[in-house]
Image (cartoon, grey):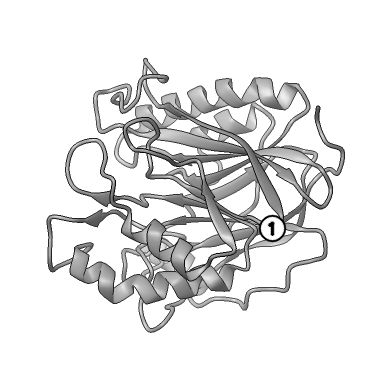
C-alpha cells in the first residue's frame, strides 16, 4: 500500500514536448516477447495482432531519433528465431527508420534492436556482449546459469554535426540481485574505455533497478549520469503504477540533457503497447567528431 501511495500520483501522461532544435531524442521501451507457439492469451500471436496498432502509434508519438527496444523478439523456443513480428511491423509502418544492433540470430542476438532515423544518422558499427563469465560467446547463460541476457550497442555518426557517439542497450535480470550487479559491473568495465577515450556514450534500457540502487551506482562509476525518471515505468499491463522507475536512460557528461525525462503513461490506439511505459529524454550532444 505504501508503494501505491507513493506512485499512483504519477498516473496519466504529460504531452510529448516539441523536440528542441539540434536535440537528439532518445527513447527506451520494453515491448515484451511475442510467443509464437500461442495463438491466444497474453503475449500470444493473437494478442500481438490486437496490440500492433498500439505499438506503432506509440512509436510514432515518441518523435524520437533513437529508440532502444528490449524483448523485441518473436520467441519460438531456443536461442533465436528468424521471425521478429514487432520489428518488421515498425520498420514497415515507419520507413524513415532503420534498425541497428540486430542481425541474423545465428550471429547477432535480435532481441534488443536500436531503431534510428536513417536521414539523420549513419550507423558505423555494432556489437553485443552477454552478461556471463564468457561474455563474447553467443547466447551464453548469465552468471548464475539463468536465461541468456546481454547488452547490444551501436555506434553512429550524426549527419548534421559529424558527431560520433555510441548507444548501449541493456536488459538486466529481474529476479536475481547478484545477476543485476554482476551484469552492471560488466557493462561498466566495457563502457569505461570508450568513455575514457572521450567518446560520448548513451545507455538505455530496462535495468530492473530503482534510482539509488547499487546496480545504477556501478554504471555511474564509469561516468554515466542517469536522467531522474520519476514514478512508474512498469505497469503490469494494466496501468498500475505501483513501483518506482526501472527503465532508464543515461549519458556521459558531454551530452547535455534538455528538460526532464518524459514517461508516456497512456494507451495508444485504445490499448497498452506493452507492460512497460516508454521513456524519452532529449540531449544535446557534443558537435566535435572523434576520429
Q: Could you say where residue 180 lies in the image, as x and y percent from the top left?
A: 40, 32
Q: Quadrant of residue 133?
A: top left
Q: Is residue 124 above or below residue 73?
A: above
Q: Is residue 106 above or below residue 133?
A: below
Q: Quadrant of residue 218?
A: top right
Q: Is residue 107 above or below residue 143?
A: below
Residue found at x 43% / y 45%:
112
Residue 80 relative to residue 129: left or right: left
Compare residues 142 and 93 and report the one nearer the observer. 93
Residue found at x 46% / y 76%:
266
Please state, as top left, top right, bottom left or bottom right, where the C terminus lies in the image: top right
Q: Residue furthest top?
A: 133
Residue 159 relative to residue 132: left or right: right
Mark 1 secondary-structure assignment: loop
Compare residues 290 and 223 and report the one nearer the observer. 290
Please state, as top left, top right, bottom left or bottom right, where the N terminus lies in the image: bottom left
Residue 275 relative to residue 187: left or right: left
Specify whether residue 230 is in view: no
Residue found at x 35% / y 34%:
149
Q: Residue furthest right?
A: 288
Compare residues 278 and 234 and report the one nearer the observer. 278
Specify whether residue 92 is in view: yes
Residue 42 relative to residue 135: left or right: left
The residue pinned by badge 1 equals 119
Residue found at x 65% / y 23%:
192
Q: Could you say where residue 94 lies in the image, as x and y percent from the top left?
A: 52, 67
Q: Quadrant of residue 20?
A: bottom right
Q: Could you say where residue 230 lies in the image, as x and y percent from the top left?
A: 57, 60
Check disc 1: other Cα within 10 Å, few if <14, some if 14-19, many if 20+: few
Q: Could you say where residue 156 lies in the image, as x and y percent from the top left?
A: 67, 41
Amino acid at each position: 500500500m505504501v508503494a501505491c501511495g507513493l506512485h499512483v500520483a504519477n498516473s496519466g501522461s504529460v504531452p510529448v514536448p516539441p523536440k528542441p532544435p539540434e536535440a537528439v531524442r532518445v527513447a527506451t521501451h520494453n515491448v515484451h516477447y511475442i510467443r509464437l507457439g500461442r495463438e491466444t492469451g497474453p503475449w500470444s500471436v493473437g494478442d500481438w495482432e490486437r496490440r500492433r496498432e498500439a505499438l506503432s502509434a506509440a512509436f510514432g508519438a515518441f518523435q524520437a531519433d533513437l529508440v532502444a527496444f528490449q524483448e523485441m523478439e518473436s520467441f519460438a523456443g531456443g536461442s533465436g528465431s528468424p521471425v521478429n513480428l514487432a520489428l518488421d511491423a515498425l520498420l514497415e509502418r515507419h520507413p524513415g527508420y532503420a534498425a541497428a544492433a540486430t542481425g541474423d540470430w545465428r550471429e547477432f542476438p535480435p532481441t534488443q534492436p536500436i531503431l534510428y532515423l536513417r536521414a539523420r544518422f549513419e550507423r558505423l558499427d555494432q556489437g553485443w556482449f552477454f552478461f556471463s563469465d564468457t561474455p563474447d560467446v553467443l547466447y551464453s547463460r548469465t552468471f548464475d546459469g539463468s536465461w541468456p541476457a546481454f547488452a547490444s550497442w551501436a555506434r553512429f555518426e550524426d549527419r548534421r554535426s559529424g558527431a560520433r557517439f555510441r548507444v548501449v542497450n541493456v536488459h538486466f535480470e529481474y529476479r536475481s540481485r547478484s545477476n543485476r550487479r554482476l551484469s552492471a559491473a560488466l557493462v561498466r568495465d566495457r563502457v569505461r574505455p570508450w568513455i575514457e577515450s572521450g567518446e560520448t556514450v548513451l545507455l538505455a534500457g530496462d535495468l530492473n533497478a530503482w534510482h539509488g540502487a547499487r546496480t545504477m551506482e556501478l554504471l555511474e562509476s564509469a561516468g554515466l549520469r542517469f536522467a531522474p525518471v520519476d514514478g512508474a515505468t512498469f505497469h503490469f499491463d494494466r496501468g498500475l503504477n505501483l513501483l518506482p522507475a526501472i527503465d532508464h536512460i543515461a549519458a556521459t557528461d558531454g551530452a547535455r540533457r534538455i528538460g526532464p525525462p518524459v514517461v508516456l503513461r497512456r494507451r495508444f490506439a485504445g490499448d497498452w503497447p506493452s507492460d512497460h511505459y516508454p521513456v524519452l529524454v532529449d540531449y544535446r550532444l557534443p558537435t566535435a567528431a572523434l576520429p
